[in-house]
Image: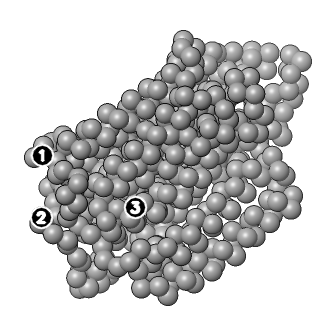
Amino acid sequence: MDPAIPEAGPRPRAVVPVLAFCGVVVAVMQTLVVPLLPHVPRLTGASPGAAGWLVTITLLTGAVFTPVLGRVGDMYGKRRVLLASLGVLTVGSVLCAVSSDIGVLITGRALQGAALAVIPLGISIIRDELPADRVLSSIALMSSTLGIGAAIGLPVAAVVMENFDWHTMFWASAALGVLDLLLVLWIVPESAVRSRGRFDVLGTLGLSGFLVGLLLAITQGADWGWSSPRTLGLLGASVAVGLLWARFELRVPSPMVDLRVSARPAVLLTNVAALLIGFAFYANSLVTGQMVQEPTSTGYGLGASIVVSGLCLLPGGLAMVALSPVSARISAAYGPRTALALAAVVMAVGYVVRFFTSHSLWLIVAGATVVASGTAIAYSALPALVMRAVPVSETAAANGLNTLMRSVGQACCSAVVAAVLAHVTFVAGGHTAPTLHAYLLIFLIAGGAALAALCATLCLPSDRPGRGAPRGRAAKGGTVTVPASVTAAQESA
C-alpha cells in the first residue's frame, strides 16, 4: 500500500454509507444539466448542437473510463483509484462553476463523466472488505445508486434552476466532491486484493476508440442523419476497431478486458440483460418530465412546470432506496437470477401501467415509480450475478464492464427516444409537438426491452442460494492472488 495515502481507521459500519453516498453524487452528475439544456444557448451563446454535448460528453467519458479505471483499480488499488475519480469529479465541477464558456463547460462535464467508475470500484471494495453476510445487501445498495442519483438529480437541478443562478448547482457538486474525498480518506480502507500483470495500454486505446466511435454514431445519428457518411463511417470504423481490439485482447497475456471470461454465458447474458435494463430504465427518466410539461393544447399534456416534472421522478428514487435491501434478500433466498427476472417483469408491468394512464399526473407518477422499483431490483441483482462468475481479482473490471453496458443501453435509448419524438409529431397551438402515440410507442419499445431482458435472464445458468456467492473480506497484509484451481472452479460454476 502506498504510504502517501493513509489507511482508513476501523469504521466498517460506515464504509457502505460512505461508498453509497459517493455513488449517488456521481450518478447525480449524469443528469444534472438536463433541465439546463434548453437554456444553455441563451446563457452561453452556444448553438443547440453544442449544448447537447454537455450530456453526450459525460456519456462518452463515462463509457471509456468506467471499465478502464475498474481494471486499474484491480491492479493498483481500488481506494487509490476511487480517490482519483472523486478528485476528477471535483475539478470538473469547479470548471463548470467558474465559467460560462461552452468549451470549458464541456471539458468540465467530461471530467464529471469520467467519475462514473466510482460505482464499480465501490462494489469491488465492498466485496473485498465486508463480511460475507453483508456483501449482497451492500452491493445491492451501491449498484442502485446509479438509478437513485439519476432520479434525484433531475428534481434537484430543476429547483436550483428555478431559484438560483445556474452555476450554483456546480458549486454544490464541487462541495459534495470534496466531502466525498474527505469521507473516503477517513473511512474507506485500501483493499489487499490485486490482480497480477502489466497494464494493457494498447487494449485500453483500442477499447476507447471502439466505444467513442460507436457511441458518437448512436448519440449523434439523429442529428447527422442515420444514413449520412459521417454516421455510417463511424459505425464502420468502430466495428473494424472492435474486431482488431478483440483479436489483440485474446492474445495479450494480461488483457484490458478478459474476453474469455466475458464470453461465459453467466457473464455475457448478464451484460446483455444490463444493456436492456439500462435502455428500459432510461426511457422512464427521459420522457416523464417532457410528457407532463407538454402544453395542454396537445390534448394530453399537463402544462406542468420544470420543477413539477422533476418531482415526478422523486418517488421512484425513494422507492429505489427502499427496495435495494429487498432485492438483496430475494437474491439471498432465491438467487440473483430470480431477482433479475422479477425485476424485468416489474419494469414491463410498469410500462403497461404507463401505456394506459397517460392523462393523469398521479397515475403517471405511479407508473414511473413502478418502473423505477423494477430498476432498483435489477441494478441490485446485476453485480451479484457478475461476481458469481468472475475471479475476485477482476471484480472492479467486470463490474465496470457491466456498468458500461448499462450506459450503452442508455445511449441507445436516448437515440430511439429522440428519433420517435422528432418524427411522430403534429401541430398543436401553433407549435410542433410529439403526438401522444409517440410517447405510447416509446413505452411499448421500453416494455419490450424489459421483456427481452427477462428472456436473457431466463437463459442464464441456474443458481442456488449460497452457491458461488460473492465472497467477503479479503486477507489483510498483502496482495491476494487467485489460484488457477479457484478460477477453474468458478468457470465451471
Q: Quadrant of residue 132?
A: bottom left
Q: Quadrant of residue 465?
A: bottom left
Against 441, residue 493 (above or below) is below
Q: First in sequence: mark 3 or mark 2?
A: 3
- In-front residue for pair 272/437: 272
In the image as oriented, which residue stretches furthest toward the top? 163
- In-front residue for pair 139/109: 109
Against 249, residue 213 (above or below) is above
The label number, if any, that marks residue 291 in the structure image: none
Query: Residue at point 29% right, 44% down?
Result: 19
Query: Residue at point 54% right, 59% down?
Result: 64
Residue 110 located left or right of residue 183? right
Q: First in sequence: mark 2 or mark 1?
A: 1
Mark 3 secondary-structure assignment:
helix
Against 150, residue 337 (above or below) is below
Q: Quadrant of residue 467?
A: bottom left
- In-front residue for pair 182/400: 182
Residue placed under numbered mark 1 in the picture: 9
Few, some or many C-alpha atoms within 10 Å of disc 1 (few <14, some 14-19, many ≥20)? Answer: few
User: The N terminus lies in which quarter of the figure?
Assistant: bottom left
Query: Residue at point 22% right, 47% down?
Result: 188
The label number, if any, that marks residue 70 in the structure image: 3
- Tell me which amino acid carries mark 2: Lys
Q: Do the residues labelled 2 and 1 touch (CB within 8 Å)?
A: no
Residue 263 visible in this rendered orientation of the protein: no
Query: Residue at point 70% right, 27% down?
Result: 44
Residue 107 visible in this rendered orientation of the protein: yes
Q: Where is residue 62? Give x, y as percent.
A: 52, 52
In the image as oriented, which residue stretches furthest toward the front? 4
Q: Where is residue 11? Give x, y as percent.
A: 12, 43
The label number, if any, that marks residue 476 in the structure image: 2
Q: Where is residue 160? Give x, y as percent.
A: 52, 18
